[in-house]
Image (cartoon, coloured by chain):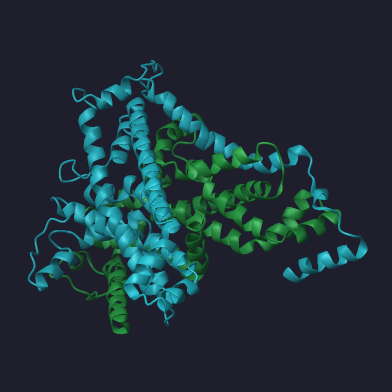
Chain colours: A green, B cyan
Amino acid sequence: MKALRVSLLAVLTLLFVSPVLFMFLTSFKTRQEAGRTPPTLFPEKPTTQAYDQILNAPDTPMLQWFANSLFAASLHSLLVVATSALAAYALARMDFRGKKPVFALIVATLFVPPVILIIPNYEIVARLYWLDTLIAIIVPTAANAFGVFFLRQFFLQLPRELEESAFLDGANRWQTFWRVVLPLSRPALVTLALLAFLTNWNDFLWPVYVLFSPENQTLQAGLSTLQAANSVRYDLLMAGAVIASVPVLILFVIAQRYVIEGVSRSGLKG
Amino acid sequence: MAVETAEAPASASAREAPKAPGSLRDRPFTAWLFLAPYLALFVVFVLGPILLGLWISLHSWDFNLPRKPFVGINNYKDLLDPGSVSFGPFWNGMQATGIFTAASVPFLLAVPLGIALIMNEKFPGRNALRAIYFAPYVLGVAVIGVLWRFLLDANIGLVNFLAGLVSLPDDTAWLSSLPAAWVSLVWVTVWWTLGFNAVIFLAGLQDIPREQYEAARVDGAGAWQSFRNVTLPGLKPVTMFVTMITIIASANMFGQSYIMTNGAPGQETRTAIFYIAEQGLQTFEMGTAAAASWILTLTLMILSVAVFFIFRDKDEARA
């Protein structure tokens, strides 16, 4: 039984690690070597040719795309955390008329397929003059039902006494929220921030259609442009893929505990 | 930080007797102030668009033309009328979406569940492996699409090379023939998102109380019986959730076919959402596209309700 598990896990791990490893190795090969059969595993003469070329090509400004993605995903993440924390706190702790329907409405959209929003949101973004800008990537997807649901669950678990005593000390709602609730919720906030960052960084369909100019692309949308321009230049494509992967992989290695916690909790009481 | 806040209640209760929880009453608009930023986004970009989409679907809505005449349910009629021009491409897309969903969802449930079961025991390196299996998900669809298009390339791809080494056919057109293209798309999707579902299953497994397994063992249940009578029932809510989100995710598959096959061979792997995006955001016939997205959405909602009832019925049968 144990031997079976070990061998299964070994095969599985190989299946997961080797493609990514091959991507890294290929990105340091020459154009000829990357397209050769039979393929080589390690680059014969490791070179950064591919990186030099795509980083200097004017129609595929990867560094600009990198900056765009970083900017958009960070701001988006901040917006998601701020708006859903405020809303979740009201829904967790305050009594007001209409609370139940509002919460039910938000949760209901968890199960609405995103395809329904594509066409109308394009029209709305166009009317706001946001087409071909990063605002279109940052804002429309920020009304995150999962965020409200997730943080509300977390706030409900916090002991009420801490907030009550802050009240007795003369703090108002905002001060209680800012000084007592938020500091206690740091793990949940970090988890949501990371999930929102990753989702936005990896968003694909929306940026492909909403961004037009080469210099305004995000990394994921840009990568498909890079592929369209160099369909069999696998040295260039793998270098591009590496550039798009390294930041999220680093972020993931540092923060994987939070990311996986967040995902695993999404199924509970879902 | 925790220490500071923990001291607060002590000092407060020392000064005066704690009032009833009712003392936390807010002025009525306070809650709405907290909700306002979220609700503004929610109304403008979620709730409003759902209704606007319905409105658009009732018009001949060309994005670039000022006149968008009302046409009632004609867009829906056209999509359902075999004689119209939109019928063919739309149902071709729906068929592709159906094939992909039917082919991928079983694997996206069974494989992650299997992995979660293997991982549900403590062994060294478990967390590292969990992270490795999850990692493709964080890379994003464009990276994995570009990577696997390379690996599955019919001429110079690693997959065909390795197949040749073990005397299998080494010239499969993985991305431009059938059924190979579907095999590729399903395989890549499983590789990409398996970690996501496995993590949710694993959390569900860890929520099943140990005592239930011990009770089963006392009753003489073997491994298979305790899996059937303890694990599966205990996992039911989680499985229902994963089934629903996986169906929705598979039915919205876009990036994989956009990057890897671009709909090939012919239009065979061009999914419904691919059709909707091109029809609405490239040809700018938004009326037709909006109607198509409503049909797809309603189909998915019916499917979700069906899943819900299937899981519930079993529950009642057991009880």
Point out residue B108 in the picture as x, y percentages from the top left corner: 32, 58
Residue at (49% x, 41% y) in the render = A109
Residue B213: quarter of image: bottom left
The image shows a total of numbered marks equal to 0
Residue nearest the observer in this picture, B118 or B309: B309
Q: Going by the image, does B17 lie left or right of B7?
A: right
Residue A115: quarter of image: top left
Residue nearest the observer in this picture, A255 or B304: B304
Residue B115: quarter of image: bottom left
Point out residue B144 in the picture as x, y percentages from the top left corner: 31, 59
Residue nearest the observer in this picture, B213 or B255: B213
Residue at (44% x, 24% y) in the render = B55
Residue nearest the observer in this picture, A200 or A191: A191
Q: Going by the image, does A244 lie left or right of A234?
A: right
Relative to B77, is B26 above or below?
A: below
Is residue A141 something one can see in this rendering? Answer: yes
Which quadrant, please, contains the N terminus of chain A?
A: bottom left
Q: Going by the image, does B51 lie left or right of B107?
A: right
Point out residue A98 in the picture as x, y percentages from the top left corner: 65, 36
Is residue A240 something one can see in this rendering? Answer: no
Point out residue A228 in the picture as x, y percentages from the top left corner: 26, 48
Relative to A254, is A1 above or below?
A: below
